[in-house]
Amino acid sequence: MDPLIYLLFILALSIFLGFALISKVPPLLHTPLMSEANAISGITVVGALIAAGSEIHSVLTIALGTFAVALATFNVVGGYCVTERMLKMFKKKESK
Amino acid sequence: MIPDFFINLVYIVSCMLFAFGLKMLGSPVSARRGNLLSALGMLLAVVATLLSQKIITFQWILIGLILGSVFGILVALKAAMTQMPEMVALLHGCGGLASVFVDWSAYHVKPVSDMVTTVALYLSILIGGITFTGSIVAWGKLSEKLPGKSILFAGQRILNTLVFAGVVIVGGLFLHTPQTYSFFLIILALSLFLGILLVIPIGGADMPVVISVLNSYSGLVACTTGFVIHNNLLIVVGSLVGANGIILSRIMCKAMNRSLLNVLFGGFGAVVKKKTDGTKKEVKPISVADAQLILESAKSVVIIPGYGLAVAQAQHAVRELSKILEENGCDVKFAIHPVAGRMPGHMNVLLAEANIPYDQLVEMDAINPLMETVDVAIVIGANDVVNPASRYDKSSPIYGMPIINADKARTVFVLKRSMATGFAGIENELFYYDNTRMLFGDAKQTLQALVAEFKSGH
């Protein structure tokens, strides 16, 4: 099978999965939801690592790769950290 | 060095961890563990990639990883909860730019590819460029480095149309001859410009929608980058995030009763000023002492916070008041409108930060049926979200917008600095109702005065 069809298959099913999962998140947690989703979107770091670590092609690709790794890591680390900071604050009423 | 097969197996585990992480965000009890699982998934993906055969040199990677981690941690720990929207906007922008660089690098190494990869590359550069500059403009607006109002200038529509047409035409040429480097660069430049053009006309009140849309874009760009570098992990995760942004944008638009197109291209600033009907209406002010007497005998109180509460830094003062009321045997709830705050769910975070337990935070749809049984509704720094005109006044710009029915409570207190209008610049008739009493002054000071009044009375 054409690998492209494969990728499109994955795409279609993932969109469904996304809608199913996220529509269950209560509005209470929408801000942490967005920052966590944002952190996950930093998955582009995987592509960035390959770009920065492959055999040297030119100065441009090294620069692009290194910046991409830095930016995507910033996205990932910053995203997970703020999400954790926010979620830590949500407390249930202590029973009296 | 590990063969690709095993690396893809790890990617599958990563995907599952991401999905579980999002699922566990369904409840505040499990949300923290969910975030941790998700982060673990990310770590696995990074480690697996580092072990792959594709990676030969490590020094540049290391520099990037260290720089990104240090800045990420510093910025994340420093940001105040009121600054969350701009923080998220900044992160969106960085993610978008990272994807653009990945695409660029892939293109530089291998300019000619099959049709689908070229289309994906084109879309990726376009969406990535828009995400980057759009997010930076949103960040500037939210952090007040740029004017928050919508920026409009003569010929804006024409310029937008021209730039958009340029992107489409050069895009067509690029698909025809992908090896032409200048086409690539023109598309990149136009996309970056388009991102600025699209966000500058949008006003501060609509920022929750813009952030949600940019969130969706940041997912989509990860997805298209996945097609460019043929990586299924990026495609799965990109679609999850894309779906997230779409759902949140829809919720925000519904809460404002506007269509997405209207928010993005409407220019809300151009609202026709409604003529006053001549009769001079009077508001009824109330003193703190009198308000305290009413609150003391109240059995149930609903507090309706708006972003003005955060501007006045009154979250902790409101927490104190709610504690005193509860000790007095009163049932206290906070009614949260979906667009209270600057991004989806922002108000909940601000109140949680002030140690208000989340079981006291109630959504609009859950509180509205109960409003008639409420003794006192206290509106703090909110305006348009409690304006009853939205129910029937067809000439009102907020007609049809769902509101919290503050007016149905037996008594309504409105804490307000002055009689100025809200974000949308609309007169609020709630202030003139018979059961409404105005507590003028700074919200924080008024709340502290109420607390002091309670304490001195006992």
Image (cartoon, helix red, strand yellow):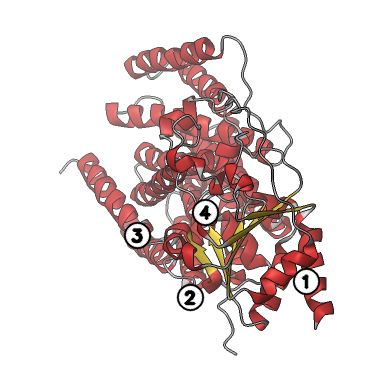
Callout 3–callout 4 Cβ contact below 8 Å: no
Q: Are marks 2 and 1 on the same chain?
A: yes
Q: Are marks 1 and 4 on the same chain?
A: yes
Which label is found at residue B451?
1
Callout 3–callout 1 Cβ contact below 8 Å: no
C-alpha distance separating marks 2 and 3? 17 Å
Disc 2 secondary structure class: loop
Q: Earlier in the sequence, mark 1 or mark 4?
A: 4
A85 sits left or right of B162 in the view: right
Q: Give above or below for B155 relative to B445.
A: above
Label 4 sits on what residue type?
Answer: His
Q: Nearer the viewer, residue B327 or B123?
A: B327
C-alpha distance separating marks 2 and 4? 22 Å
Location of residue B4 in the rendering, given as x and y in whole percent from the top left corner: 34, 55
Give the residue at the far front of this rendering. Answer: B279
Which label is found at residue A21?
3
> Residue B242, located in which quarter of the rendered image?
top left
Location of residue B115 in the rendering, given as x and y in whole percent from the top left corner: 28, 26
Q: Give above or below for B192 relative to B255.
A: above
Label 1 sits on what residue type?
Answer: Val
Q: Which residue is mark 2?
A: B29
Local packing at callout 3 (Cα closer than 10 Å; few below 14, some 14-19, many 20+) is many
B175 sits left or right of B160 in the view: left
C-alpha distance separating marks 3 and 1? 42 Å
Q: Nearer the viewer, residue B38 or B295?
A: B295
C-alpha distance separating marks 1 and 4? 25 Å
Q: Are marks 2 and 4 on the same chain?
A: yes
Label 2 sits on what residue type?
Answer: Val
Q: Are marks 2 and 3 on the same chain?
A: no
